[in-house]
Amino acid sequence: MANLSIKLRNCSVELPDDVGNFILSTGCGSGKTYWLERFILAHYMEGMLIVVDSIVSANTLYYDLLNLLGLAATDMMLIHSQAEYDVQNVFANTPEEVTKKKVLIMTNVRLYTEYPPVYLLYDINGVVLSPFDGDWKKMMNNPNTRRWIIIDEIHGFIQKYATVSKLHLGVLGTDDGNGGYKAKEFVAMRKDYNTFCFVRHNCNIGETKNRYSSFRNRTRIFQHDESTR
């Protein structure tokens, strides 16, 4: 099996060119981002998701690839809150078009806020999208999953579990018995959600203004397993 040779300023690192998770930790200024740009140029036809730490980093990488390394703008897309309107319009109304892009450059917070299939799946002719059911194993074994998913730094404050204030949790929270609060059990939470939103306020949560939102609103980031509760 061939190895990927990562040549940095003061060393070279060999990684297996195979399915798996690899962490490259060589310190700041060692040349990882410089190497990344050349790696993208060599492998972008296989489908890539590049996750960076900020909008500035995303824009810098995009324009380096476009202006210095010659990648075509039609092969790439920036995904962040300050992307141009026409990009946001494509993302919202024709998300299948996003899956045709060879290189997606995205800020890391989007890993937690967006609909996963739109940034993880790739096919030059586009991928037929459907709501995500939370089955990450099936997603990562999908034949259309992007060949390369590279995270170039991620914030240390991002934790495994989310903390939601009592104010925002509202009727979905309950006393934890220790002077604090916690989310209700799934069955109770669903009952109160349906009662207070759909019955008392007659909210149509499923109503959306664009195609992308219709997928995201029906997506489950994690599978719920009643047997583990």
Image: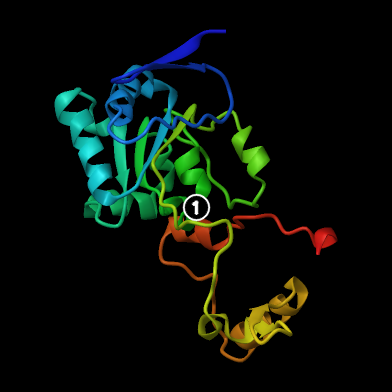
- Return the x and y of residue 213 as percentages of the image width and height: 46, 60
User: At x 73% / y 71%, what residue is drawn?
Assistant: 186
Q: Residues within 10 Å of mark 1 (few under 14, many from 20)?
A: many
Q: Seen in the image, is 97 located left or right of residue 223?
A: left
- Return the x and y of residue 144 as percentages of the image width and height: 54, 31
Q: Is residue 142 above or below residue 213?
A: above
Tell me the quarter of the picture where residue 180 sits: bottom right
Under circle 1, the secondary element is loop
- Return the x and y of residue 104 as percentages of the image width and height: 36, 38
User: At x 52% / y 81%, what residue is drawn?
Assistant: 168
User: At x 32% / y 20%, what residue is drawn?
Assistant: 8
User: At x 54% / y 74%, what residue is drawn?
Assistant: 164
Q: Is residue 43 above or below residue 155?
A: above
- The residue positioned farthest toward the left in the image shown: 67
Q: Seen in the image, is 227 located left or right of residue 100?
A: right
- The residue positioned farthest toward the right in the image shown: 227
**Amino acid type, callout 1:** Tyr
Q: Nearer the viewer, residue 129 or 221?
A: 221
Q: Nearer the viewer, residue 104 or 56?
A: 56
Tell me the quarter of the picture where residue 46 sits: top left
* Residue beneath disc 1: 115
Q: Quadrant of the C terminus?
A: bottom right
